[in-house]
Image (cartoon, rainbow, N blue to C red):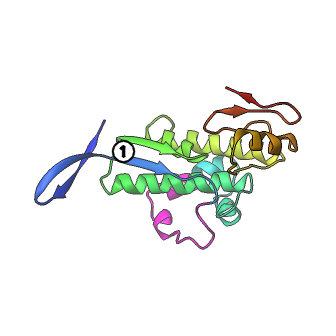
Amino acid sequence: MSTGAIEDGGARQSVMILFAFAGEGVHSKSSDMTLVKQSPSFSRCEAALANLSVSMEEALSKGLGTHVAPYSVVATTVVNICLCDTWKLWGFTPSAACGHSIGELAAAYASGIYTLEETLAAAVLLGSIAARKTGGMLHTSVSSLAALNDELKRSELALAAGASNVVRTGGCDLYLA
Protein backbone atom coordinates (compact mmCIF):
# COMPACT_ATOMS: atom_id res chain seq x y z
CA MET A 1 0.00 0.00 0.00
CA SER A 2 1.18 3.47 -0.76
CA THR A 3 1.27 6.27 1.76
CA GLY A 4 1.42 10.01 1.57
CA ALA A 5 2.95 12.45 3.99
CA ILE A 6 1.62 15.36 6.00
CA GLU A 7 3.33 18.03 8.08
CA ASP A 8 2.32 18.09 11.74
CA GLY A 9 4.17 20.70 13.77
CA GLY A 10 7.22 20.40 11.54
CA ALA A 11 7.33 16.58 11.65
CA ARG A 12 6.46 14.57 8.56
CA GLN A 13 4.10 11.70 9.12
CA SER A 14 3.13 8.94 6.73
CA VAL A 15 -0.57 8.67 6.08
CA MET A 16 -2.88 6.29 4.32
CA ILE A 17 -4.79 7.90 1.44
CA LEU A 18 -8.34 6.78 0.68
CA PHE A 19 -10.13 7.74 -2.52
CA ALA A 20 -13.91 7.64 -1.87
CA PHE A 21 -16.30 7.86 -4.82
CA ALA A 22 -19.93 8.96 -4.78
CA GLY A 23 -22.93 7.26 -6.28
CA GLU A 24 -25.55 8.75 -8.59
CA GLY A 25 -27.27 12.03 -7.84
CA VAL A 26 -24.45 13.70 -5.92
CA HIS A 27 -23.13 15.83 -8.77
CA SER A 28 -25.84 18.34 -9.65
CA LYS A 29 -26.48 20.13 -12.92
CA SER A 30 -25.24 23.29 -11.21
CA SER A 31 -21.98 21.63 -10.10
CA ASP A 32 -18.88 23.41 -11.22
CA MET A 33 -17.51 21.06 -13.87
CA THR A 34 -14.36 23.13 -14.49
CA LEU A 35 -12.10 20.78 -12.53
CA VAL A 36 -13.63 17.71 -14.18
CA LYS A 37 -13.21 19.19 -17.67
CA GLN A 38 -9.57 20.06 -16.92
CA SER A 39 -8.82 16.48 -15.92
CA PRO A 40 -6.27 14.66 -18.05
CA SER A 41 -8.94 11.97 -18.55
CA PHE A 42 -11.84 14.12 -19.76
CA SER A 43 -11.01 13.75 -23.45
CA ARG A 44 -10.13 10.06 -22.96
CA CYS A 45 -13.58 9.50 -21.42
CA GLU A 46 -15.21 11.29 -24.33
CA ALA A 47 -13.31 9.14 -26.85
CA ALA A 48 -14.00 5.88 -24.98
CA LEU A 49 -17.71 6.68 -24.81
CA ALA A 50 -17.79 7.64 -28.49
CA ASN A 51 -16.35 4.18 -29.25
CA LEU A 52 -19.37 2.79 -27.38
CA SER A 53 -21.76 5.04 -29.35
CA VAL A 54 -22.51 7.14 -26.27
CA SER A 55 -22.48 10.95 -26.26
CA MET A 56 -20.65 12.21 -23.19
CA GLU A 57 -22.26 15.64 -23.62
CA GLU A 58 -25.72 14.06 -23.53
CA ALA A 59 -24.82 11.86 -20.55
CA LEU A 60 -23.56 14.86 -18.58
CA SER A 61 -26.45 17.14 -19.51
CA LYS A 62 -29.13 14.54 -18.71
CA GLY A 63 -27.39 12.61 -15.95
CA LEU A 64 -26.00 15.07 -13.42
CA GLY A 65 -28.08 15.38 -10.25
CA THR A 66 -30.50 12.63 -11.28
CA HIS A 67 -31.15 8.93 -11.09
CA VAL A 68 -32.12 8.61 -14.75
CA ALA A 69 -30.65 5.59 -16.49
CA PRO A 70 -28.64 5.27 -18.60
CA TYR A 71 -27.38 8.85 -18.28
CA SER A 72 -26.75 9.22 -14.54
CA VAL A 73 -24.68 6.03 -14.36
CA VAL A 74 -22.38 7.23 -17.13
CA ALA A 75 -22.23 10.86 -15.92
CA THR A 76 -21.33 9.84 -12.36
CA THR A 77 -18.65 7.46 -13.60
CA VAL A 78 -17.09 10.12 -15.85
CA VAL A 79 -16.98 12.64 -13.00
CA ASN A 80 -15.45 10.08 -10.63
CA ILE A 81 -12.79 8.98 -13.15
CA CYS A 82 -11.85 12.58 -13.89
CA LEU A 83 -11.57 13.46 -10.19
CA CYS A 84 -9.50 10.32 -9.56
CA ASP A 85 -7.01 11.17 -12.28
CA THR A 86 -6.84 14.81 -11.19
CA TRP A 87 -5.98 13.75 -7.64
CA LYS A 88 -3.29 11.43 -9.04
CA LEU A 89 -1.93 14.28 -11.18
CA TRP A 90 -1.64 16.34 -7.99
CA GLY A 91 0.56 13.59 -6.54
CA PHE A 92 -1.93 11.64 -4.46
CA THR A 93 -1.84 7.86 -4.79
CA PRO A 94 -4.57 5.96 -3.00
CA SER A 95 -3.69 3.35 -0.40
CA ALA A 96 -7.25 2.13 -0.85
CA ALA A 97 -10.39 3.14 -2.73
CA CYS A 98 -14.08 2.68 -2.00
CA GLY A 99 -17.31 3.70 -3.65
CA HIS A 100 -20.98 3.95 -2.91
CA SER A 101 -23.26 2.33 -5.48
CA ILE A 102 -22.00 3.16 -8.98
CA GLY A 103 -18.97 4.78 -7.32
CA GLU A 104 -17.66 1.25 -6.89
CA LEU A 105 -16.70 1.30 -10.58
CA ALA A 106 -14.44 4.29 -10.01
CA ALA A 107 -12.96 2.58 -6.94
CA ALA A 108 -12.07 -0.41 -9.14
CA TYR A 109 -10.56 1.99 -11.69
CA ALA A 110 -8.55 3.85 -9.02
CA SER A 111 -7.26 0.50 -7.76
CA GLY A 112 -6.10 -0.56 -11.22
CA ILE A 113 -8.64 -3.37 -11.51
CA TYR A 114 -10.30 -1.82 -14.58
CA THR A 115 -8.90 0.40 -17.30
CA LEU A 116 -10.68 3.64 -18.12
CA GLU A 117 -12.26 1.97 -21.15
CA GLU A 118 -13.40 -1.08 -19.14
CA THR A 119 -14.83 1.14 -16.40
CA LEU A 120 -16.87 3.18 -18.87
CA ALA A 121 -18.00 0.06 -20.74
CA ALA A 122 -19.28 -1.36 -17.44
CA ALA A 123 -21.07 1.94 -16.68
CA VAL A 124 -22.72 1.95 -20.12
CA LEU A 125 -23.80 -1.68 -19.70
CA LEU A 126 -25.19 -1.11 -16.20
CA GLY A 127 -26.96 2.05 -17.36
CA SER A 128 -28.55 0.27 -20.29
CA ILE A 129 -29.76 -2.55 -18.05
CA ALA A 130 -31.17 -0.08 -15.51
CA ALA A 131 -32.94 1.84 -18.29
CA ARG A 132 -34.93 -1.29 -19.14
CA LYS A 133 -36.04 -1.91 -15.54
CA THR A 134 -38.82 -0.32 -13.54
CA GLY A 135 -39.06 0.10 -9.82
CA GLY A 136 -37.56 2.15 -7.10
CA MET A 137 -35.43 2.12 -4.01
CA LEU A 138 -36.62 2.35 -0.44
CA HIS A 139 -34.54 3.96 2.27
CA THR A 140 -36.25 4.31 5.61
CA SER A 141 -35.93 3.73 9.31
CA VAL A 142 -38.36 1.77 11.43
CA SER A 143 -38.69 1.19 15.16
CA SER A 144 -38.49 -2.60 14.98
CA LEU A 145 -38.23 -5.57 12.66
CA ALA A 146 -41.94 -6.18 13.23
CA ALA A 147 -42.70 -2.67 11.95
CA LEU A 148 -40.45 -3.29 8.96
CA ASN A 149 -42.25 -6.57 8.26
CA ASP A 150 -45.63 -4.77 8.38
CA GLU A 151 -44.39 -2.21 5.86
CA LEU A 152 -42.89 -4.86 3.59
CA LYS A 153 -46.12 -6.89 3.51
CA ARG A 154 -47.70 -4.01 1.61
CA SER A 155 -44.88 -3.83 -0.93
CA GLU A 156 -43.25 -5.81 -3.69
CA LEU A 157 -39.80 -5.22 -2.23
CA ALA A 158 -37.41 -8.03 -3.04
CA LEU A 159 -34.59 -7.26 -0.62
CA ALA A 160 -34.03 -5.14 2.46
CA ALA A 161 -30.64 -4.98 4.16
CA GLY A 162 -30.23 -3.62 7.63
CA ALA A 163 -28.67 -4.34 10.98
CA SER A 164 -30.07 -7.88 10.86
CA ASN A 165 -29.57 -8.52 7.11
CA VAL A 166 -33.29 -8.77 6.40
CA VAL A 167 -34.27 -10.53 3.18
CA ARG A 168 -37.90 -10.66 2.12
CA THR A 169 -40.08 -10.93 -0.96
CA GLY A 170 -43.43 -9.13 -1.16
CA GLY A 171 -46.29 -11.22 0.22
CA CYS A 172 -44.08 -13.48 2.36
CA ASP A 173 -43.12 -13.46 6.01
CA LEU A 174 -39.89 -11.82 7.08
CA TYR A 175 -36.78 -13.98 7.12
CA LEU A 176 -33.71 -13.07 9.11
CA ALA A 177 -30.32 -14.15 7.82
Does residue 120 appear left or right of residue 19 in this picture? right
Q: Position of residue 129 (x, y in %)?
A: 76, 42
Q: Quick one: 171 or 135, which is closer to the camera?
A: 171
Q: Please give the name of the residue rendered at 69% of the width and 43% of the height, measured from the top-left corner.
A: 144
Q: Position of residue 136 (x, y in %)?
A: 78, 50
Please give the residue where the numbered disc 1 appears in the rendered image. Answer: 94
| Rendered residue at 61%/46% (across/down) | 102
Q: Is residue 65 above or below residue 175?
A: below
Badge 1 crowding class, 10 Å Cα cut-off, few under 14, some 14 to 19, many 20 or more, is many
Left or right of 40 on screen, residue 76: right
Task: Report the side of 36 relative to 64 (left or right).
Answer: left
The span picked out in magenta is 26-45
Residue 138, position in %: x, y?
A: 74, 49
* Amino acid found under the numbered disc labelled 1: Pro
Residue 37 among those drawn in magenta? yes
Considering depth in this image, is 123 or 65 the residue closer to the camera?
65
Query: In the rendered image, which quarter is residue 101 located in?
Result: top right
Residue most extreme to the top: 177
Q: Nearer the viewer, residue 42 or 105?
A: 105
Q: Give whichever of 44, 71 is nearer the camera.
A: 71
